[in-house]
Image: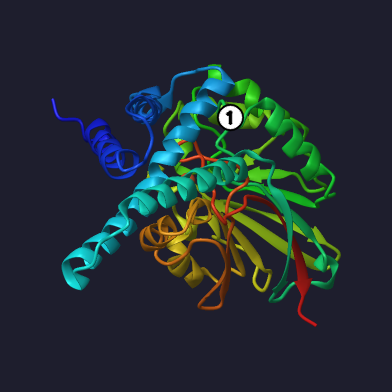
Amino acid sequence: MFNPFVALPLLVCTYEILTMLLPLRISLTAKIFASLILLSGLAKIFLLHRTPSGFDMYELPYYLTLTFTAIFNFIIVAVFLLLIKDCIQVFCRLILRKPFPNYYAALFVFSIALCATLYGTYEALKQPQIKTHEVVINNLGREFDNFRIAMLVDIHADTLTNREFVQELVTRTNALNPDLILMPGDFVDGQVATRRADLEPLKDLRAKFGVYGTTGNHEYYFDFEGWQKEFKRLNITMLNNEHFIITSGDSQLIVAGVPDQTGDEHNTSLAVKDIPENAPVILMDHRPSEARENSQYNIALQLSGHTHGGQMPIIYSLVKKFNRGFVRGWYEVNNMKLFVSPGTSQWNGFACRIFDPSEISLLVLKAKP
Ligand SMILES: [Fe+2]
């Protein structure tokens, strides 16, 4: 039976063997060996298997998973470069009617793809940078000037983002001395039984006003109810169309959260129902795509993730198209500010970041001067 998840990558690999490996001036044995390595990257696809609600990944040792991941990344990076090379080749031969240096072009693509893959895989797997963002909030009371929010999103805990990684993430976040920690979704990829230990360090997160989260789309792919119980056990309060109020002196700050659209319960109107007038609202919504609709509810700042910052040039444009123009960083949407985090870790679907570092975002709120 035709399976596009297998057929398409197989087609891509065949294309890469024919247009990148065959023109290289290496022995036939080396070409066969290189082709087999390339094809082994497809093991990544077979590691993903369908569960009743989505895709899970078979558990393999860390370095074996890393090897398949890196080769798979190379397949993805190389195909875009090869398409550009072959467009230039067609232009040279058919339009300019000039010879094309096929060997040098193939060698160039192979070398660039290899370097980009090594860099992109390293960038995806290393600890995120800490990035401070100062943001002026309308109607923010003086008591909340310099209020510090640490934002962690798209952790996607799995074999590569394991317990050691999450433990270090927690230590570095706590060192920022945040007043509040917000986590708008995509905590984990996997079942509770296999992934519980990887998220366990999150229970050590510390902030003066607590740790709050919302669901991302990936929370719905694996044992939704089981993970909700886990978040409770880890002292992460999930906001499902709810808000809470932080009061300091005469001022108030409201933090609201909506669940991801996958669950069909996303309701911003309900999340901000009966909020006090003139108090600024910070909304967690995993995806940035509803920002224009959310801006109708007098929200000062929306915090989102989901896009992983676009991951690499070319794919960035696709991510932008599918997320209504919002990919990474700051946007003004009507009178609302929108911050889209590039994510705090990697995602096993494509664990590669080229010119797209992950980050722990430290948002420092500023009252209007
Ligand atoms: Fe997501």
User: Which residue is at 61% across, 41% downward?
Assistant: 122
* Residue at the spot of label 1: 160
User: Which residue is at 27% across, 56% downward?
Assistant: 86
Q: Is residue 187 left or right of residue 126?
A: left
Q: Is residue 56 left or right of residue 129?
A: left
Label 1 environment density (alpha carbons within 10 Å; few <14, some 14–19, many ≥20): many
Mark 1 falls on what kind of element? Answer: loop
User: Which residue is at 66% across, 40% downward?
Assistant: 126
Residue 284 picture location, percent across and down: 57, 54
- Residue at the far bottom in the pictured view: 369
- The kind of residue on which mark 1 rests is Leu
Which quadrant holds residue 83?
A: bottom left
Residue 140 visible in rendering: yes
Residue 200 visible in rendering: no
Which quadrant holds residue 96?
A: bottom left
Which image quarter holds the N terminus?
top left
Q: Is residue 321 above or below residue 139?
A: above
Q: Nearer the viewer, residue 57 or 30?
A: 30
The way the protein has been coloured in the rendering is: rainbow
